[in-house]
Image (tube, rainbow, N blue to C red):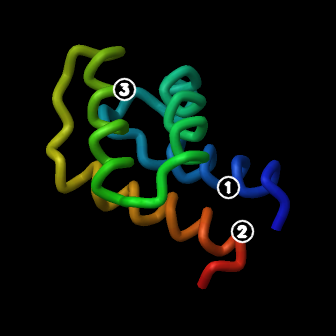
Amino acid sequence: MENIEMNQKCVHILQQWDPFGFGAESYDTETADVVAALQGIDDPTKLAKVIQKVYEHSFEQWIPFEKCVAIAYKLIAVKFEAKCII
């Protein structure tokens, strides 16, 4: 899987997540920030902290850490699949 395809899958996952119920297209900036961070992070806990911080900064709403960890695992699974690490 190419890096572009991996990024597209991750964008789709994040858009479907819709943590605040604003609609899939409401998180373009946050999605880009999280996908960029994913490039250098392999640890779901670290990625979850980034996700929580990015969304909280933009929307001034807190997302429970457990929800961030769940989405982080999905994103890292896509990354590992793309890199053939699994």
Instruction: Give the side of residue 63 with respect to residue 1, left or right.
Output: left
- Relative to 56, say whether 31 is above or below: below
Rendered image: mark on residue 82: 2
Rendered image: mark on residue 9: 1
Percent of width and height locating residue 15: 53, 41
Percent of width and height locating residue 36: 59, 36
Rendered image: mark on residue 77: none
Instruction: Give the side of residue 26 with respect to residue 20, left or right.
Output: right
Kind of residue at disc 3: Val
Q: Earlier in the sequence, mark 2 or mark 3?
A: 3
Q: Is label 2 in a helix, a strand or a loop? A: helix
Q: Is label 1 in a helix, a strand or a loop? A: helix
Name which residue lies at 18% across and 55% down: 66
Name which residue lies at 60% across and 66% down: 78
Hey, which quadrant is residue 2 in on the image? bottom right
Specify few, some or many for label 1: CA neighbours under 10 Å numbering under 14, 14-19, or 20 or more.
some
Kind of residue at disc 2: Ala
Q: Which residue in the protein does label 3 denote?
A: 54
Instruction: Give the side of residue 76 with respect to residue 11, left or right.
Output: left
Percent of width and height locating residue 58: 35, 15
Using the numbered discs, state the Cα–Cα distance from disc 1 to disc 3 in whole angstroms: 19 Å
